[in-house]
Each structure stands twice: as C-alpha cells, then as structure tokens.
Image (cartoon, rainbow, N blue to C red):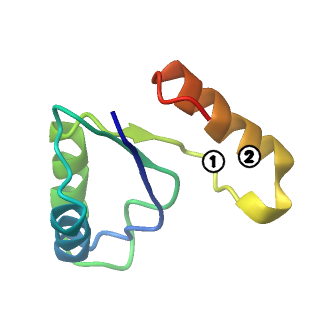
Amino acid sequence: QRLVVVGDVHGCLEPLQRLLRTLEFSKERDKLISVGDLCCKGPDTACVLSFMQRLDAAVERARLALKDDPEGLARIDAAARDLGAGS
C-alpha cells in the first residue's frame, strides 16, 4: 500500500485527477491523504469533495508546515503507522 499525500487542492479537480493518473493511483492499493485546503479559489469545490469521498481520502484539517512543525511531522508519521504504511 502506498500513502499518497496531497495538499492545497483549492477546489481544482482536474489537476488533482491528472496528478493521481500520473501516479497510477488505485483506490484498492493506495491511501490518499489531504493535508491542505480542499475548497476555495477553484471552480470545482463540490466535485473535489465528492471525488475525495469516493476515494475514501483521509483529510487532515489542520494546516501543516512540515519543515517547521515537528508536531505536524509526528502526526503524519502516526497516520502512516495507523494505515500500516510505516514511517
């Protein structure tokens, strides 16, 4: 199982779908985690939310500045362990 982490989708469905196609993302094999804003700015907020729900994506509501946030990194490591992906 791969852990795919995306951030700041901002309601832009097509770039998200393009990224997942490039990664050959599979709902059956991979786990998708969003750590940034899903909504705002882009034209497809409702579609993004529906798409993420269909993929059973985990959504981290807190904004994480990973390089400056040791607690944020610890949360990501804990989430990976909970998903069985290791760290």
> Which disc, if any, is residue 3?
none
Write the residue at 81% across / 42% down.
71
Q: Which residue is mark 1?
A: 62
Residue 44, picture quadrant = bottom left
- Horizontally, is 62 left or right of 40 in the view? right
Q: Give the quarter of the image for residue 31.
A: top left
Residue 6 in which image quadrant? bottom left
**In front here: 38 or 68?**
68
Residue 33, percent across and down? 42, 44
Residue under the point 16% across and 74% down: 14
Disc 1: CA contacts within 10 A as few (<14), some (14-19) or many (>=20):
few
For the residue marked with disc 2, what is the amino acid? Answer: Gly
The residue nearer to you, when weighing 16 against 62, is 16
| Relative to 36, residue 77 above or below | above
Give the quadrant of the N terminus.
top left
Image x and y of residue 29, in percent: 22, 34
Q: How many numbered circles are shown?
A: 2
Q: Secondary structure at mark 2?
A: helix
Could you tell me which quadrant the C terminus lies in?
Answer: top right
Q: Is residue 47 left or right of residue 83?
A: left
- Measure the alpha-carbon separation of dots 2 and 1: 9 Å
Q: x%, y% of residue 22?
A: 20, 69
SS for callout 1: loop
Q: Earlier in the sequence, mark 2 or mark 1?
A: 1
**Would residue 50 appear left or right of 77 to someone viewing this image?**
left
Q: Which residue is mark 2?
A: 72
**Which amino acid, by three-letter code, is at mark 1?**
Ala
Pointers 2 and 1 in contact (C-beta within 8 Å): yes
